Amino acid sequence: MDDLKQIARETRKDIIQMIELAGSGHPGGSLSCVEIIVALYYKIMRHNPKNPKWPERDRFILSKGHAVPTLYSVLSRKGYFPREWLWKLRKAGNPLQGHPHLLSTPGIEASTGSLGQGLSIANGMALAGKLDNKDYRVYAIIGDGEIGEGAIWEASMSSKRYKLDNLCAILDHNGLQIDGSIQAIKDPYPLKPKWEAFGWEVLEVNGHSFNELLIAFSEAKKIKGKPTMIIANTVKGKGVSFMENDILWHGKAPSHEQAEQAINEIEHS
Amino acid sequence: MAELKSLRDTYGETIVELGKSNPNIIVLDADLSFSTRTHRFKEAFPNRFFNLGVAEADMMGTAAGLASCGKTVFASTFAVFATGRAWDQVRLGIVYSKLNVKIVASHSGIEVGEDGYSHQAIEDIALMRVLPAMRVIVPCCANQTRAVIRFVAKEKGPFYVRLIKHSLPILYPEDMEFKLGQATTLKQGKDITIGAIGSMVPRTLEAHKILKTKGISAKVIDFASVKPIDEEAIKQACDETRGFITCEDHTTAGGLGDAVAQVILAHHPIPHLRIGIQGIFGESGTSQDLYEKHGLTANHIAEKAEKLLKY
Ligand SMILES: Cc1ncc(C[n+]2csc(CCOP(=O)(O)OP(=O)(O)O)c2C)c(N)n1
Ligand SMILES: [Mg+2]
C-alpha cells in the first residue's frame, strides 16, 4: 500500500510537470482520478506493456479524456512508451495528444475527449469479449459532469440489457464540472439510486483510498449478471492545496512557481 | 499591426447589450460559458440564462422549444460539439422548422491548438452549410463580430456564427454594418483573387503585401457570409483576375473553398486553389505550429498564388 501511495505521488508530480511544460491541460480532473488509474494498472488489470494489443488483456477506457495526463504518466511508468514523451505532451508531432488517440499512443484503447462516448465503447468491448468467450474485463472512468450527456444513460441501459458483468465503470465523483458544481449545473443527484434504478450494481468508495478501491474492484469481479458502477468520491485537484475544489483549475496550466509549489506539496504529503 | 481583440469577448459584450433592450433574448450554454463568454450574459440576466451542462443535444432541443414559443435564442458551446454532437437536433429540431436560434460557437478550426483533433472543429462549416435554411457567418474581427451578432439577433431564423479561441486584429470600423450575402473587397487587385474567412483574413492581407513586393497585384475578399455567398463578387473576380484562391481554417471539403468553387464552375472556370486542411485530421500543437504544418500562413498563401498564376 505504501508503494501504491508513492506511485500516486510520482504520478501527481508527472501530471503537474507535463501540464506546466505543455502550457495547457486539465490538472483538476487529472489529479482526482490518480488512485483509480494507479490501482487498476498496478493491481487489478491484466495487461502487458510489451504487448499492448495482447487479445486477452483487460481494457481501460478513459471516457473523461481530458484527464489523460494521469493515464500517460501511468502508461509510461509501466513501460508502454518512453518517459521523455511526457515532456512533449500537446506539442506538434508528439505522439501524446491533448486527448487520447487510439492510433497515436501505445496503450490507449479508444479515442475520447468528446465527453459521453466512452461507456458505449466499453459496452462494445464487453460484448465482443462475451461473443469471443474471452474472460477479459473492461474498465471505464466517466466524469460526474460527463453524465450530463444523454449518451451515458443510453449506454447504461445497454450494459444492463446485455448483462455486461465483465464491465466495471468508475464514476469520478469530484462534484465539479467546468462552470460550477454538478449540483448547480445539471444536478444529477441522487447518484447511487439512479444507477441502481438503471440496473447496475453500485459500490461507493473513497476514490483516494487504495484500500477501498482494491476491495471494490475485487467485489465487482464477483458480481454476475449485471455491470458494476463504482462511485468514487474524490476531490478535484487532489494533492495540491490551491487546486483542490476549485473550478479555476479545471483547465489551466500552472506557472513555473505554482508547479514548484505543487510538487513540493505532493512530495511532502 | 492593428489592435488585437477577442471575438468571443465581443460576443459576450454584445449579447449583454442586446439583452438590455430586448427581454426576449435567451442564452444557453453547455458547461463552457467561461470559454464562450456567455457567462457575461448570465451575470447580467441570470433569469434568462440556462446552463444545460455537458449536454449539447439537450441544449439544441431546448433552444428549439424556447424559439417555438417566441424567444430569440443564442446557443453557445465549442464549434465541434455545437455542430457535430448535436447535428440532428440542429437539422431537424431547429433548421427544418426555421426556428429563431442563433448558434454562436467558439473554438473552431485547428486554431484551437493543443487540445487536439477532439476539440478542433474543421468540418463545422460543411455540416452547417449543407442544411437548407441555415445561414453561416464567419467573422474575422471583433468589430465585425459585434455587427454580426446585432444582425442575427434581429433577423428571423437560424444562423451559425463561427468564432475562434484567439484574438484577431481589428479590420473594420466600430460602427460597421453587416450585410448578409455580401462579401467585402479589402484590397483591389488585377492578377489574382484571394478570398478568406476568419483567422485567414489577416493572413491573406499579409500575403497581399508579400505578393506586392513581387509585382503581383492580389485582390483580397472577406467572405464572412459563407452562406449565402456573394455570387456577384465571385463572378466579378473571375472576370477581373486570372486565378482564385480560397483560404480557411477548415477542411477544403465542404467549406468556403467548395462554396466558391460551385460558383466559379457554374459561371466562368478559372484556376481555383483551395487552401485549407487537405483531408487529414487535426492534432495537438500550438496554433502557429499547426498553421505552419497545414500551409495556412501568409508565406504559404503568397507562394501558392505565385504558382497558380504560372499555371
Ligand atoms: C461533448 C463535450 N462537451 C464539452 C466538452 C468540454 N469539457 C471538457 S471537460 C468538461 C467538464 C467535465 O466535467 P467532469 O465530467 O466532471 O470532469 P472532471 O471534473 O473529472 O474534470 C467539459 C464540459 C467536452 N470535452 N466534450
Ligand atoms: Mg467532475
Image (spheres, rainbow, N blue to C red):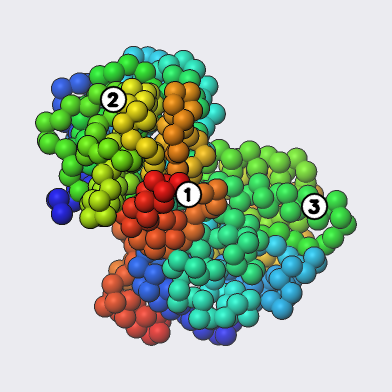
Q: Is residue B37 left or right of residue B67?
A: left
Identify the residue under disc 3.
Answer: A128
In depth, the one of B259 and A54 nearer the eye is B259
Asked if the beta carbon under badge 2 is closer than 8 A to the nearest atom of ligand 1, the reply is: no
Cα separation, mark 2 vs mark 1, equals 25 Å
Q: Residues within 10 Å of mark 1 (few under 14, many from 20)?
A: many
Q: Residues within 10 Å of mark 2 (few under 14, many from 20)?
A: some
Amino acid carrying mark 1 in the image: Ile
Measuring 28% from the left and 25% from the top, which residue is drawn there? B182
Name which quarter of the figure residue B16 lies in.
top left
Which of pointers 2 and 1 lies earlier in the amino acid sequence?
Answer: 2
Cα separation, mark 2 vs mark 3, equals 54 Å
Are the residues under badges 2 and 3 in a single subunit? Answer: no
- x, y percentage for residue B300? 37, 56
Identify the residue under disc 2.
Answer: B182
Measuring 49% from the left and 17% from the top, which residue is drawn there? B96
Contact between marks 1 and 3 (CB within 8 A): the answer is no
Q: Which mark is residue B277?
A: 1
- x, y percentage for residue B109? 41, 47
- Tag 1's secondary structure? strand
Q: Is residue B184 left or right of residue A224?
A: left
Q: Quadrant of the N terminus of chain B?
A: bottom left
Q: Chain of mark 2?
A: B
Amino acid carrying mark 2 in the image: Gln
